[in-house]
Image (spheres, rainbow, N blue to C red):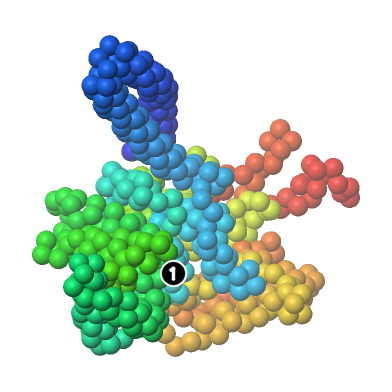
Amino acid sequence: MPTSDLHAILRNHLTRLDQRILRLKAVDRRIAWLRLGVFILGGMLVWAATGRWGSTGFWWALAGAVVAFNAAVFLHRRLDGWSATLQTWRAIQANQLARLELNWAHLPPSPHSPNPQQMTPDVDLDLTGPRSLHNLLDLSVSREGGRLLASWLTQPTPDLEQIQARQALVRELAPMRRFRDRLLLVFKRVSKELLEGQKLLDWLKEDIPARRLNWALPLATAWAIVDIALFVLNVTGRLPAYWILTLSLYGVFYFHELPLVGKFLEAVVVLDKELDKFRALLHYLEGYRLNGRPQLERFLSPFRDPRQRPSVQLRQIKFVTVLVGLRMNPIIDFLLNLIAPWDFACAFMAARSRTRVGDCLPAWLQTWYELEALISLANFTALNPGCTYPIIDPSAATVFEAEGLGHPLIRPEQRVYNDFVIPNLGQVTIITGSNMAGKSTFIKTVGINLRLAYAGGPVIASQLRTLPFRLATCLRISDSIADGFSYFYAEVRCLKSLLEALEVESPLPLLYLIDEIFRGTNNRERLIGSRAYVRSVAGAHGVGLIATHDLELAGLAANTPQVVNFHFRDQVQDGKLTFDYKIRPGPSPTTNALKIMELEGLPVE
């Protein structure tokens, strides 16, 4: 399906949802008037029935009015629930449209911000942070799921076994649009906040001396029974008020042992919200039919064991949290513990529930985090119908071969696709061209698609076959006032680390991307240093792409076989510079700096 058709489908879907929401709002107003009418008519009916049939008529009319009014209230609340669900569903579809259009203003901000002082592919390739690949992909409803996706995108070296496993799951998830959207709907109907899985794990770590509780609860229970028995005997006149003494001793025992359970019960209260969020997700996953999806069936098997359903176990814990929640009211807490060892019983039940799920909960959460990251990659696949799953082959004859390669952070209607081949290891590709012609964007396109491939997702290409590479970049250099680094010194350090990475003994070759080498110094020294650097990396255990304005560097191809030239072109039409952003073999035949200066009104000799 072309991207334009998908765009039209989402737009039409949003239009239909807007119409349904407007109709519901109109019905909602009528129901509100109905409630008022039922209330007024009910009052008039009660008054009339009282005057005609006396007290009997009053009670019958009042009962009928209450029933009718409650029915109207129930209908109104159901209608509000439907409206809220439709609003949430519309927000999910609008979010999908924003991801398709790369409308950053309508996407939630990314919680993962890279350190701009660190010269890494994370920063250079816009992998995380605002308006990044992670920001575009991330559909996670938990912080941990978003962090896991970010770690996949920034993984320094590819793991072929993991990549293949993730690709298989993403392939099965990609056409399951309804499954993905409804899973989001289930969560957002329960909570507008992110799932805090760490709170669930913290509860497992909360210390409680179970052995002490095992004898404290029976003792407190027996004590409470004695207190009640003595109180009853005193009230019936059979014994003096001995219960005051035993109750006082029970109070001393209770307050002495309260620190034993107090902190643990507070952790259970904190757990309550997270349980509601996670249990709703698990219940949906447990019942969803996965016919014909063997990889996904195996992956979700921890959630789908009919003998030990996670949602059932979490429901039991939820029951305990409700009991614990009653003690948050001081008066109710006093009365409950006055007649029974309520806190000890709640702590005992919570400890037993924790023991039952202690081994399972970390695995459930980890599976859920991975599912979130996989869903994000699958959703990206569905929104980019022209993408493909890369072939990462350690025995490939050609080092890197791409057809129709495009940048995922450029809107589909503006994206330009290029074919590009690197035949042998040791090759250094010098990419020249005028300003704004597309050199930097192209080398970033290669890098960001490799990161997508290593995460297990698809790439923006019609075909991509590559060796597994380590990846190093030297693209966005920044000085550091705090550390006292100039721009040029920061660039030198980056290029040195790249050389060191090339010299590391590794079964994986290095793919390095460099933009405007040694631009922080004068022309003469830049050219001397650039030539020496290119000669030193040519023929090494890796391949490189170097974008530069220095046309003199293109001359290295004449006497260095491993150096190959490519370029981007521009042309002037109707007094304006135009670019086609297509890469071509050979050095650039043109420059445009003076033309740009002239077009912008700067003096040019």
Position of residue 490 measured from the top left corner of the image (x, y, whole percent): 69, 76
Regarding residue 526, the answer to whether it shows in the image is no
Position of residue 431 measured from the top left corner of the image (x, y, whole percent): 59, 61
In this figure, which residue is indicated by the disc labeled 1? 151
Q: Nearer the viewer, residue 144 or 418?
A: 144
Q: Is 575 positioned to the left or the right of 81 in the image? A: right
Does 466 appear above or below 570? below
Position of residue 101 measured from the top left corner of the image (x, y, whole percent): 49, 41
Position of residue 162 measured from the top left corner of the image (x, y, whole percent): 30, 70
Q: Is 371 positioned to the left or the right of 591 in the image? A: left
Q: Nearer the viewer, residue 62 or 211?
A: 62
Q: Quadrant of the N terminus?
A: top left
Identified at 55% across, 61% down, the residue is: 129
Q: Nearer the viewer, residue 279 or 490?
A: 279
Q: How many marks?
A: 1
Identified at 36% across, 46% down, the residue is: 189
Q: Amino acid at mark 1?
A: Ser
Q: Nearer the viewer, residue 175 or 289?
A: 289
- Packing grade of label 1 (10 A; few <14, some 14-19, many >=20) is some
SS of the residue at dot 1?
Answer: helix
Identified at 85% across, 42% down, the residue is: 601
* The quarter of the displayed image where residue 276 is located: bottom left
Residue sitting farthest toward the left: 307
Does 128 appear above or below 257? above
